[in-house]
Image (cartoon, helix red, strand yellow):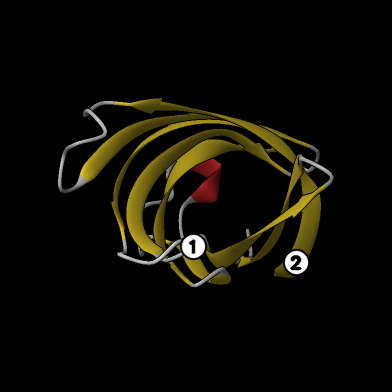
Amino acid sequence: MSSRIRGTFEVTITPQTGAEAPVGRLSLAKRYHGPLAASSTGEMLAVHGGVQGSAGYVAMEKVTGTLEGRQGAFALQHSGSMDRGAQSLFIAVVPDSGTDALAGLKGTLAIEITDGQHFYVFDYTLPES
């Protein structure tokens, strides 16, 4: 089945390296609300460019909870960049990372930030039960 869901999330980002490090490492903790009711932990690597508003990051995130009532876990892979403020972001479910009722999960997740609040849009497919 193919679905698109939307909801909110909160994220806590904790630096694991000092500001002088050539590559920043940060820990992520998220709480997803709505059709995806879950928590996640992850790690991010980031580098700032030499111009204000330019940077790149990669991250891996392990999500555990329920997706429209189906219990399990899965991993998300992030790849993002900012080119003088213009953002590009791609987040995808890691192939074959779904467990339990989320086995076979495939999809992409988009992040929107409006007035300081974080929203997700998750396009996904699951095998027929």
Work out whether 50 lies above or below 113. below
Res. 71 in view: yes
Kindly identify which residue carries mark 1.
53
Measured as percent of width and height from the top left, residue 7 is found at 79, 45
Give the left or right position of residue 77, taking residue 8 as reference: left
At x 51% / y 60%, what residue is drawn?
105
Give the left or right position of residue 121, taking residue 99 as reference: right
Measured as percent of width and height from the top left, residue 83 is found at 46, 75
Work out whether 65 lies above or below 49. above
Q: Quadrant of the C terminus?
A: bottom right
Q: Amino acid under label 2?
A: Ser
Instruction: Give the distance between the C-alpha atoms of the residues marked 2 and 1, in whole angstroms.
Output: 34 Å
Most extreme residue toward the right, as rendered?
A: 115
Give the left or right position of residue 39, taking residue 43 as reference: right
Kindly identify which residue carries mark 2.
3
Q: Amino acid under label 1?
A: Gly
Give the image quarter of residue 47.
bottom left
Res. 37 in view: no
Pointer 2 local density, CA inside 10 Å: few below 14, some 14–19, many at least 20: few
